[in-house]
Amino acid sequence: MTEPSTFEIYLVATPGLEAGLREEAHAVGFTGAKVTDGGVALLGDWPDVWRANLELRGATRVLARIGSFRAMHLAQLDKRARKIAWGEVLRADIPVKVEAACKRSRIYHAGAAAQRVATAIREELGAPIAEDAEVRVMVRIEDDLVTVSIDTTGESLHKRGFKEAVNRAPMRETMAALFLRQCGYGGNEPVLDPMCGSGTFVIEAAEIAAGVKPGRERSFAFQQLKTFDPDAWNALRSAAAPQTSAIRHYGSDRDAGAIRMSTENAGRAGVAELTLFEQLSIEDLACPEGPPGLVIVNPPYGTRIGNKAPLAALYRSLGAVLKSRFGGWRVGIITTDAGLARATGLPFLEPGPPVLHGGLRITLFQTPPLPKRVT
């Protein structure tokens, strides 16, 4: 039997990366986290909600499940929604937005369902209802089971609060963090991205190595809830001091604008001393001095930018450079096309499941440590 103060916390994941998010949740101390439909579920309390938002790199957002009941029609939904203890979680002076989704249920009109719950909140609590409210109440009705959640995050967690400049077709930080985890990166080896764009992989790697929290520079929707304790939150946010790291992480790109963006983003993130960005073509790429590490790259894949046909040569060139100059390093390549990955000639392991990204299905192709060339 769980304590009265505990409830289900639901971590929303990028489709295809749920298992990686569960592993991360376990790694930071959330015991009992389990993969479920579209994310990861665990039991916890409000400080756990705050910590999940602050510390988890792979979650898209954090939902707090505050109520569940069955409803067969709108009148029943209205009546049972009024029994939720809204005043224990929401504040009467903070606007609220209600969103609903219906699936395989006798209540099938999501707009009507959202309106009934919004009316219950307004009349029972007195909180104003507003479309632009930061606090969102999310109602899911599936097989006539109504689940009521609070979005405790606000803006998606990939918005760390420091990246002002982005390139075309950027990789979200949440996805980059989980791809790094899938590649076995734990902060104790160099990472290199030879097509770094706005620097996402390199900056995430440097932050992990430095031991800083991804949510340290931003605000969250839970700060507008009645359950929020500013003193406890400030203590939690300042509890972990950054770690000293001597490992450098590298990004390169043929575009000077990308290097400028990456350098500025790393500076705002506070990891400029742990990163080095250079304007280089793939042909000019050199292996950094020191121990081997991880090369991870999200190259163009045709459906994203331009045409797929001329990209095979780019992938072949990338593979040739990595095989000849990066012996001992592991490689991770993210692409939509297994044929393009094979064009590198790299010894890929069996790939994992595809991941949804911008309407596309992308896959991480990984190698073991590349053979070292005998000179």
Image: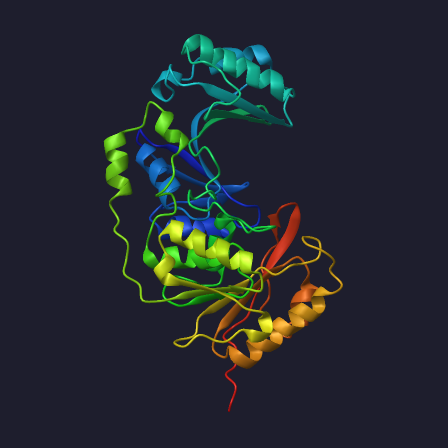
Residue drawn where x is 68% and y is 63% of the image: 338
Residue 195 position within the rendered picture, expressed as x and y whole percent measured from the top left: 56, 62
Residue in front for this viewpoint, 187 or 32:
187
Q: Say if 252 sits above or below 88 in the image.
A: below
- Check the picture and name the quadrant holding the N terminus: top left
The residue closer to the viewer here, 182 or 19, is 182
Q: Is residue 214 above or below residue 254?
A: above
Q: How many marks?
A: 0
Judge whether residue 154 can be spotted in this image: yes
Q: Quadrant of residue 337?
A: bottom right
Q: Position of residue 261 (x, y in %)?
A: 49, 53
Front residue of 212/91: it is 212
> Measuring 64% from the left and 59% from the top, which residue is drawn there?
300
Left or right: where 196 falls relative to 44: right
Residue closest to the far bottom: 375
Figure check: 321 above or below 237: below
Residue under the image location 62 percent in, 21 percent down: 110
| Whether residue 72 is visible | no
Q: Position of residue 149 (x, y in %)?
A: 46, 28
Residue reaching furthest right?
309
**In this view of the protein, which residue sits in the foreground, 316 or 137?**
316
